[in-house]
């Protein structure tokens, strides 16, 4: 399975440096777009190969570490790979390849401006994501969390229009305000209480804080991690939909919101400690808040006519699954939450790719305009169907497993209400996703007579390849959920401190 | 030229019949404390006599580059050997004036002289652009007087001697500000003159009261005698402390005694603003620390006067009100000046917390903010140099034409906000921890919340510089000559460096803080 035979530390360093190196190389080929995109693709593939080569080491129970650059007493920039981070890095690096292929089709098909800047910022975002996934402590994670915010801002405002600037400003302000105003005080408090910010299997706060301060601290984390888009801190996500579609994919599937969900899982598991949190019963309120966020977001999604806005609210709802999983604080729910990072990524990136493809090929953005689009773009809409079914959580698509595990986790934790919410939400998912498919396939395209055939006009080939691949992955993931679960279970069972 | 100074300094040293000095082979090293002050003061006199700006600048450059070397040697000695006491003229304390150097003031002296050394290459083009040729030697002479005065305040351990140096540095500052080429500079200098004099007068009245009670002007001696004297008659002592406190607070521009600062910084020549913003208020903060902890705190319980509470509240107000004022300024210089006032709030906040992490935060912020604000004002000065304006509304798209300058501005701006990886984060982290240890939870949030206001005003500049279409008036602008660019880049690099490696900033600040706290009653 090992692609590259090298010591884990070397591989880690390579994984951290490759996307950064890509970001430096891309501008050199400013005048040769083919070479420039070549650099992006090669960098992405190299990164994925390196990350994949780290997997066997982690599966063997090792936790390779690196760095240890001390900024202050107790504040260290250090990296260490554990199963959750491994999985997140795999998701981000694999989707970067596909997303880059898609970007080529989308950006050229749309004749977008400043493409070099686009690819550079993209590479920097990926670099930040990988570093965030491999962070050994909360301080390191926080730094790259902020780098990710700043490096995605130019991407969100890429179009340069007034609307893009407004959306970008909301995006930046909400994410920075929550992270500096809430998350950073949470870090300070954690450091003051625990004397460290390291991620440790038993949780560093365990047994050191009780009562209302504990609730408050959890709240600071839950709302301070704005990227997890827990309501009411979610509205940056819909306002960021002004971005070009590959960026939406980056935001919704590859990196940004996943970084938030990932941080939430890490904090609950390694900072608070699951047993501690459930014993102190500090998590119950978060279960309810996450459930409420889940249902509300789904309801709002139904009301959206803009395709990307509907998908954005869908993401808010799906992220609430992961926050819910973290709030349930059982090992099964955490495994389910981790798996939902993967499953939702595959499903949602497919849906966004489809939305982008429709925009490139037909210049349509509203759902009410999509009558009969499935006859013009059959491949795209087929992929959209697969992505939708995976998000809804039907077999044989990957989305089933994560919901399944979170549900089991809810039963373990004795929160039956959460199971009801999960089922309800699946119904909502059906209600806001499937009408789009029905409209696309069943309704006649505007201005055609019944029975009349329309010419097929799909998006550029790179887009089609990318969205077919991600749709395929939704199916593949249904059958490969086992290994993923094995990997995630190691958070609790396997692996010493290698 | 440097030989001349060495000779002059050695001459000054030879006049000291000091037993300890005589027995050691290398005499110069023992006189480091006084050299710090004597070199710039003597050089100022010589500098005023030089015929042309270029000579005066070259001469000042040599002096400015000598000072950090002596300051570094001094800091190194203090860190390895402990506190140094240097009796001026061989008159032993408490009769004579004592220069007393510990980790805190050695650190401040290195900061002041270091900023001078980094900034001076920048002065050449900038001063040429803003000040008439024949006045330039006077300007450099004032600068040397000012730095001599500031180093003197830091070095001396004598309350009245502090007053003398305070006046030397202030008078020199008034002159420097008045040389700004905007006519409003005169008014700003006059305003500062009045308020600065009031501050110094309050300070000297306070010292007078304390002298009346204790019969000594030596700070260490005063600290010892204040305790017993306090038990006898506490009214004059409390009054004296209050006078000193308000006088110093005026000098460090603590809200609401800050009104002199924005105009002074906005209309002074760019180089003067760079230097003063990074050093003058910092030395005043040092003076506050010295008086509050080494003198009063060591003699009487700090809470016999509500100094800490008053300081805490004023600091918090400064952090918010001045940050908000900065948001609504159109002139970059005035915006940065208000930002400075808010940042001074952070420093005094650290002082008011009066625990080890809090004080460390205050002291290290003194250092970090000096670097950050010097860089920001340098960038603002460069913009003024290229465009003749620093109004934000006229700078649309400037980032395209001055990429390096604006990049440096952004990095320094991130430092002001306190983004991790910059020096600003380190200070805020310590302050936050200090607030937690002091049980002041709300303060943690207030520190972060005011950082967010900094985000707004820095974000405003970023938006104008990068996300607006180019203003035709800015079309011909470009990055400045290397002599201006390199100092700015050096400072920017330092902001990042001290955000990652704190061995030479926070660690020393921590030692200084511990030194201040050990003497507390």
Image (cartoon, rainbow, N blue to C red):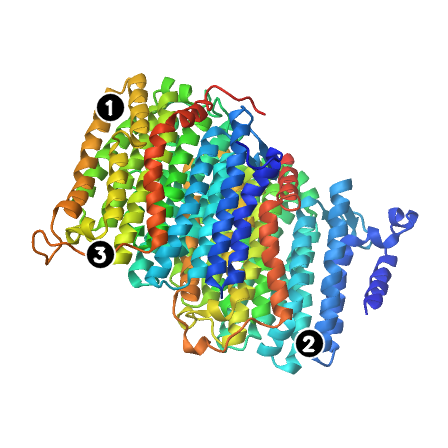
Where the C terminus of chain A falls, by quadrant? top right
- Tell me if mark 1 has few (under 14), some (14-19) or many (20+) residues whose alpha carbon lies within 10 angstroms of its own: many
Q: What element carries label 3?
A: loop
Seen at 46% across and 28% down, the residue is A271
Seen at 23% across and 33% down, the residue is A292
Observer-nearest of A104 and B233: A104
Give yes or no for contact between labels 3 and 2 (Cβ–Cβ under 8 Å): no
* Chain bearing mark 2: B
* Chain bearing mark 1: A
**How many labels were placed on the picture?**
3
Q: Where is residue A68 in the image (x, y as percent from the top left)?
A: 61, 36
Q: In this view, does A284 lie above or below A6?
A: above
Q: Which of marks 3 and 2 is in front?
A: 3
Observer-nearest of A18 and B478: A18
Q: Name the residue under label 3.
A: A364
Q: Earlier in the sequence, mark 1 or mark 3?
A: 3
Q: In this view, does A51 lie above or below A244?
A: above
Q: Mark 1 points at which residue?
A: A419
Q: Mark 2 points at which residue?
A: B137
Q: Nearer the viewer, mark 1 or mark 2?
A: 1
- Tell me if mark 2 has few (under 14), some (14-19) or many (20+) residues whose alpha carbon lies within 10 angstroms of its own: many
* In-image side of A366 versus B288 (left or right): left
């Amino acid at each position: 399975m090992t692609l590259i035979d090298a010591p884990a530390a070397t591989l880690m360093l390579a994984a951290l440096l490759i996307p950064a190196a890509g970001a430096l190389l891309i501008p050199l080929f400013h005048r040769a777009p083919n070479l420039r995109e070549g650099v992006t693709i090669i960098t992405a593939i190299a990164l994925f190969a390196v990350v994949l080569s780290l997997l066997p080491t982690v599966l063997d129970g090792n936790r390779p570490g690196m760095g240890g650059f001390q900024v202050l007493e107790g504040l260290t920039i250090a990296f260490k790979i554990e199963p959750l981070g491994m999985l997140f890095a795999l998701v981000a690096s694999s989707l970067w390849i596909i997303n880059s292929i898609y970007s080529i089709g989308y950006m050229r098909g749309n004749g977008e401006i400043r493409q070099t800047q686009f690819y550079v910022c993209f590479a920097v975002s990926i670099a930040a994501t990988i570093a965030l996934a491999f962070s050994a402590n909360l301080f390191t994670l926080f730094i790259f969390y902020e780098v990710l915010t700043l490096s995605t801002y130019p991407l969100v405002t890429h179009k340069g229009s007034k609307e893009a600037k407004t959306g970008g400003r909301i995006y930046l302000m909400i994410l920075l305000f929550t992270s500096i105003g809430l998350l950073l005080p949470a870090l300070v408090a954690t450091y003051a209480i625990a004397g460290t910010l390291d991620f440790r299997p038993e949780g560093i706060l365990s047994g050191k804080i009780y009562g209302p301060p504990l609730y408050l601290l959890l709240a600071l984390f839950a709302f301070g991690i704005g990227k997890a888009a827990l309501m009411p801190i979610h509205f940056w996500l819909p306002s960021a939909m002004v971005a070009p579609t590959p960026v939406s994919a980056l935001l919704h599937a590859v990196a940004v919101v996943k970084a938030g969900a990932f941080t939430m899982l890490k904090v609950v598991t390694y900072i608070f400690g699951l047993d501690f949190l459930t014993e102190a019963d500090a998590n119950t309120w978060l279960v309810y808040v996450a459930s409420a966020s889940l249902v509300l977001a789904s309801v709002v999604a139904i009301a959206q006519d803009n395709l990307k806005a509907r998908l954005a609210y869908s993401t808010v709802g799906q992220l609430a699954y992961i926050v819910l999983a973290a709030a349930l604080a059982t090992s099964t729910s955490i495994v389910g939450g981790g798996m939902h990072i993967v499953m939702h990524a595959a499903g949602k990136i497919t849906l966004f790719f489809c939305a982008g493809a429709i925009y490139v090929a037909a210049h349509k953005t509203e759902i009410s305009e999509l009558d009969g689009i499935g006859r013009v773009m059959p491949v795209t809409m087929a992929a959209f169907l697969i992505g939708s079914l995976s998000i809804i959580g039907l077999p044989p698509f990957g989305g089933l497993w994560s919901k399944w595990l979170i549900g089991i986790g809810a039963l373990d934790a004795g929160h039956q209400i959460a199971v009801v919410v999960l089922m309800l939400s699946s119904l909502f998912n059906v209600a806001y996703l499937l009408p789009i498919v029905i409209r696309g396939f069943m309704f006649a395209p505007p201005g055609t007579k019944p029975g009349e055939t329309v010419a097929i006009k799909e998006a550029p080939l790179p887009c089609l390849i990318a969205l077919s691949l991600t749709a395929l992955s939704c199916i593949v993931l249904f059958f490969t959920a086992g290994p993923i679960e094995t990997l995630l279970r190691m958070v609790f069972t396997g692996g010493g401190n290698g | 030229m440097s030989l001349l100074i060495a000779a002059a300094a050695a001459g000054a040293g030879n006049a000291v019949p000091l037993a300890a000095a005589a027995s050691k082979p290398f005499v110069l090293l023992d006189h480091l404390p006084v050299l710090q002050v004597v070199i710039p003061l003597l050089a100022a006199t010589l500098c005023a006599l030089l015929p042309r700006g270029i000579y005066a600048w070259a001469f000042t450059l040599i002096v400015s580059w000598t000072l950090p070397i002596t300051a570094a040697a001094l800091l190194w000695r203090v860190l390895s050997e402990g506190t140094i006491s240097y009796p001026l003229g061989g008159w032993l304390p408490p009769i004579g004036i004592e220069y007393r150097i510990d980790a805190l003031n050695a650190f401040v002296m290195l900061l002041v002289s270091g900023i001078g050394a980094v900034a001076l290459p920048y002065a050449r083009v900038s001063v040429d652009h803003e000040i008439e040729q024949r006045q330039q030697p006077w300007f450099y002479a004032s600068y040397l007087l000012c730095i001599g005065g500031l180093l003197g305040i830091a070095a001396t351990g004598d309350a009245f001697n502090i007053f003398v140096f305070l006046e030397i540095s202030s008078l020199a500052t008034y002159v420097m500000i008045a040389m700004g080429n905007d006519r409003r500079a005169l008014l700003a200098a006059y305003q500062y003159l009045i308020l600065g004099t009031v501050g110094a007068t309050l300070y000297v009245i306070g010292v007078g009261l304390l002298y009346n009670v204790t019969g000594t002007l030596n700070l260490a001696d005063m600290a010892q005698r204040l305790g017993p004297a306090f038990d006898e008659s506490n009214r004059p002592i409390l009054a004296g402390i209050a006078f000193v406190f308000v006088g110093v607070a005026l000098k460090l521009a603590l809200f609401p005694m800050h009104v002199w600062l924005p105009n002074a910084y906005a209309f002074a020549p760019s180089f003067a603003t760079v230097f003063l913003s990074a050093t003058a208020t910092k030395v005043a903060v040092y003076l506050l620390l010295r008086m509050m902890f080494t003198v009063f705190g060591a003699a009487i319980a700090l809470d016999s006067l509500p100094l800490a509470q008053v300081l805490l509240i004023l600091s918090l107000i400064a952090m918010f009100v001045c940050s908000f004022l900065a948001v609504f300024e159109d002139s970059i210089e005035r915006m940065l000046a208000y930002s400075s006032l808010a940042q001074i709030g952070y420093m005094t906040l650290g002082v008011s917390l009066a625990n080890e992490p809090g004080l460390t935060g205050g002291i290290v912020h003194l250092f970090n903010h000096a670097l950050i604000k010097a860089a920001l004002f340098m960038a603002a000065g460069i913009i003024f140099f290229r465009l003749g304006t620093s109004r934000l509304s006229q700078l649309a798209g400037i980032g395209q034409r001055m990429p390096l300058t604006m990049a440096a501005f952004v990095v320094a701006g991130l430092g002001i906000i306190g983004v991790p990886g910059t020096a600003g984060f380190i200070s805020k982290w310590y302050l936050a921890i200090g607030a937690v240890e002091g049980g002041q939870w709300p303060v943690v949030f207030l520190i972060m919340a005011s950082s967010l206001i900094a985000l707004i005003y820095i974000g405003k500049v970023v938006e104008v510089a990068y996300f607006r279409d180019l203003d035709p008036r800015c079309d011909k602008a470009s990055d400045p000559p290397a002599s201006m660019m390199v100092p700015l880049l050096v400072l920017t690099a330092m902001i990042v460096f001290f955000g990652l490696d704190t061995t030479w900033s926070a660690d020393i600040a921590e030692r200084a803080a511990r030194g201040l706290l050990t003497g507390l009653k």
